[in-house]
Image: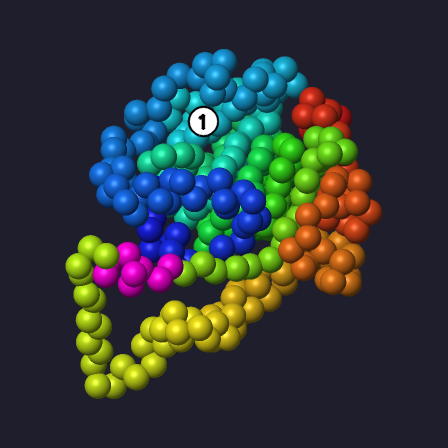
Amino acid sequence: MLYLHNILGGVWFVEENFAANYFPLIASFLTKPEAMFGKPRNASSEQEPTEDNALLFASLKNGAYQISEYGGWSPPEDAPKNSVAIMNINGAITKYDQECGPSGMLTKANLLNRCYNENNIKAIVLNIDSGGGEGMGCRIMQEAINSRNKPVVAFCNDFVASAAYGIASCCDKIVANSNVCRIGSVGTYMTIVDTSEYYAKMGIKLIDIYASKSTDKNQEFQKALQGDTEPLKKVCDTYNENFISSIANARVGVINEDQGQWATGKMFFAPEAMNIGMIDEIDTFENVLNYFNT
């Protein structure tokens, strides 16, 4: 679920055009609260794959074994011997599961750790097609990948930006699917919403009352609403430096040491991304599976 407190005040590692696609959904959350509620999605309620929702190219050929979104109908524990586990990371990256979309990174990290524990799984491919998302979700997956006990490869399936690239950067190898695969948007931003006019039109006046000693509480947000965004910019800077450092450390010796070449939020096509060390190869999914059969 795209939790409102994270949408309206969280720190995001996301490509802006990708984020804009979610604006209608966010608007429906704000204007139609009932849209936020629905039948919970979990492993036990997962449906069998169909031609519409299965990863068509991840067949049993070359030992590929598709892990389902919540590990229900196709769990790591059922993988045949010598399997290469395929995990999808698609859409917005969030810490928690989305009622209106894919599983969150807490669930993904759990599935990843279950793959590590299965002797029948010899390697893992993360099939990534995402413009990024929550910074906390990115960190959770980075930590899970960094604890790996077997090879983990990131397959960039057309679009891998910001938090999605942060996740990919921790893998043993990053492979783009074509020359027009877009990669990058390494950066951080925050969006806050001034709801005062909205509530005023509804005849609602909000009055905040703070404890006497809580003189600094919520000051960054209050100042931003008054036009002074510098305090929140410092918050973004702190998250951003940590984000950039995590990528630089994960790709040390490979990625260009000049962070100005890749850490400004710019997007790159795969050949340019490879030239500056953001990815390792441009190849097909089938060939990626062959990496583990030699």
Task: State whether residue 148 appears in this view.
Answer: no
Residue occupying the point 21% across, 86% down: 212
The image quadrant of residue 247 is bottom right
**Which stretch did the figure color magenta?**
193-200
As drawn, the residue found furthest toward the front would be 201
Label 1 secondary element: loop
**Residue 204 percent location from the top left of the image:** 18, 61
In this view, the residue in front, 220 or 277, is 220
**Residue 70 percent location from the top left of the image:** 40, 31
Above or below for 34 versus 165? above
Three-letter amino acid code of the residue under disc 1: Ser
As drawn, the residue found furthest toward the right would be 275
Residue occupying the point 47% across, 51% down: 134
The image quadrant of residue 225 is bottom left
- The quarter in which the C terminus is drawn is top right
**Residue 74 percent location from the top left of the image:** 43, 23
- The quarter in which the N terminus is drawn is top left
Residue occupying the point 40% across, 40% down: 24
The answer to whether residue 25 is left or right of residue 235 is left
* Magenta segment main secondary structure: helix
Above or below for 138 versus 208? above
**Residue 178 percent location from the top left of the image:** 73, 31
Residue occupying the point 19% across, 76% down: 209
Q: Which residue is mark 1?
A: 68
